[in-house]
Image: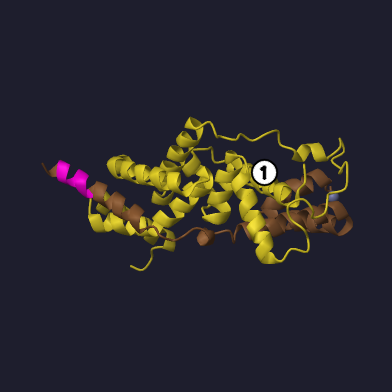
Chain colours: A yellow, B brown
């Protein structure tokens, strides 16, 4: 008794929650939507770039998640599974509208010579953001630039920085291999820094 | 091998800020920053933007989720009725 770790306790609570969801208890579904719905809507809005479409996509995905909850076998967390459902539906819509922005050549390597030294000085703050911006203004710039990043960077940053998913949850949500998120997260952060600073790197 | 190349320093930044780097790597990393103006500048920008990205929240989105919730719960209840028939 009392020997369960916090992780085990969370896993047990999640199993009970999934059982209630599978049994179709409306209160379980209401709790789930209250807990994750606003974050999922935030995610969909930032991915799609418009709130109206995001709401439609979210409604569709949540109803679909309800229909397919029996297929959830607990290989990942419920949170990852929800993000996966909303993410896949959002990406389908973005591709259908031919709005998907792919990641270009990774510019980071281009900044260095054969010896791994900077070819040029790292630029200071100019472009969209200036060093003398106060934090509030800079925060607005960061949010705006995040919404303009290629989708492959944006999805990772939203999950990691904004919604606070861990690397394992991101892998499960995006269905990528476990070795991949570290590099994906780093490149996405580097792209955001470049966009904010106005660096072409 | 004490000396870290600038390109390797830049590659390691996320490990550093996520607390995933060993003490040895952290020492070499911060040691490099002390002597390299470009990496220091890049790191400061990267870290500032990363910290601000963590503060980008749903603040700028209206929190009204009620109608989405109502729609989904309606659909769920409709489907439940179908199941029961
Ligand atoms: Zn350097």
Which stretch is magenta? B77-82
Q: Residue B14, position in %: x, y?
A: 68, 51
The reply, left or right, for residue B2 in relation to residue A151 is right
Q: Nearer the viewer, residue A102 or A173?
A: A102
Q: Note whether residue A14 is visible.
A: no
Q: Residue A103, position in %: x, y?
A: 64, 35
**Quadrant housing the N terminus of chain A:** bottom left
Q: Is residue B65 above or below residue A152?
A: below
Residue pictured at 75% horizontal, 38% vertical: A107
Q: Note whether residue B39 is visible.
A: yes
Q: Nearer the viewer, residue A157 or A18?
A: A157
- Specify the farthest residue to the bottom: A2
Q: Is residue A46 above or below residue A139?
A: above
Question: In terms of secondary structure, what is the magenta stretch mainly?
Answer: helix
The reply, left or right, for residue B41 in relation to residue B58 is right
Q: Residue A125, position in %: x, y?
A: 79, 55
Q: How many neighbours does mark 1 have within 10 angstroms: few (below 14), some (14-19), or many (20 or more)? A: many
Residue pictured at 60% horizontal, 59% vertical: B54
Q: Nearer the viewer, residue A61 or A145?
A: A145
**What is the secondary structure assignment of the residue under circle 1?**
helix
The reply, left or right, for residue A191 in relation to residue A59 is right
Q: Which residue is mark 1?
A: A187
- Specify the farthest residue to the left: B85
Image mark 1: chain: A
Does B78 lie within the magenta span? yes
Residue pictured at 55% horizontal, 55% vertical: A162
Residue pictured at 69% horizontal, 60% vertical: A138
């Amino acid at each position: 008794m009392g020997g369960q770790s916090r992780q085990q306790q969370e896993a047990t609570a999640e199993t009970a929650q999934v059982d209630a969801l599978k049994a179709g208890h409306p209160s379980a579904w209401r709790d789930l939507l209250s807990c994750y719905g606003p974050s999922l809507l935030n995610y969909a809005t930032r991915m799609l770039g418009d709130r109206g479409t995001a709401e439609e996509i979210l409604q569709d995905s949540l109803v679909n998640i309800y229909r397919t909850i029996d297929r959830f076998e607990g290989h990942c967390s419920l949170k990852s599974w929800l993000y996966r459902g909303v993410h896949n539906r959002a990406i389908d819509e973005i591709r259908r509208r031919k709005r998907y922005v792919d990641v270009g050549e990774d510019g980071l390597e281009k900044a260095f010579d054969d010896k791994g030294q900077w070819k040029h000085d790292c630029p200071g703050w100019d472009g969209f953001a200036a060093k003398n911006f106060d934090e509030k203004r800079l925060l607005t710039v960061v949010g705006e630039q995040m919404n303009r990043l290629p989708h492959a960077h944006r999805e990772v940053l939203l999950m990691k920085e904004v919604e606070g998913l861990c690397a394992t949850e991101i892998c499960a949500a995006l269905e990528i291999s476990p070795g991949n998120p570290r590099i994906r997260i780093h490149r996405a952060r580097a792209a955001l820094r470049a966009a904010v600073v106005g660096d072409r790197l | 091998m004490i000396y870290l190349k600038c390109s390797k320093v830049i590659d390691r930044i996320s490990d550093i800020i996520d607390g995933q780097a060993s003490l040895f790597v952290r020492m070499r990393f911060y040691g490099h920053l002390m002597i390299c103006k470009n990496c220091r500048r890049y790191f400061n920008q990267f870290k500032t933007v990363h910290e601000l990205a963590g503060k980008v929240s749903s603040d700028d989105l209206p929190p009204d989720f009620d109608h989405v919730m109502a729609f989904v719960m309606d659909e769920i209840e409709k489907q439940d009725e179908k199941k029961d028939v």
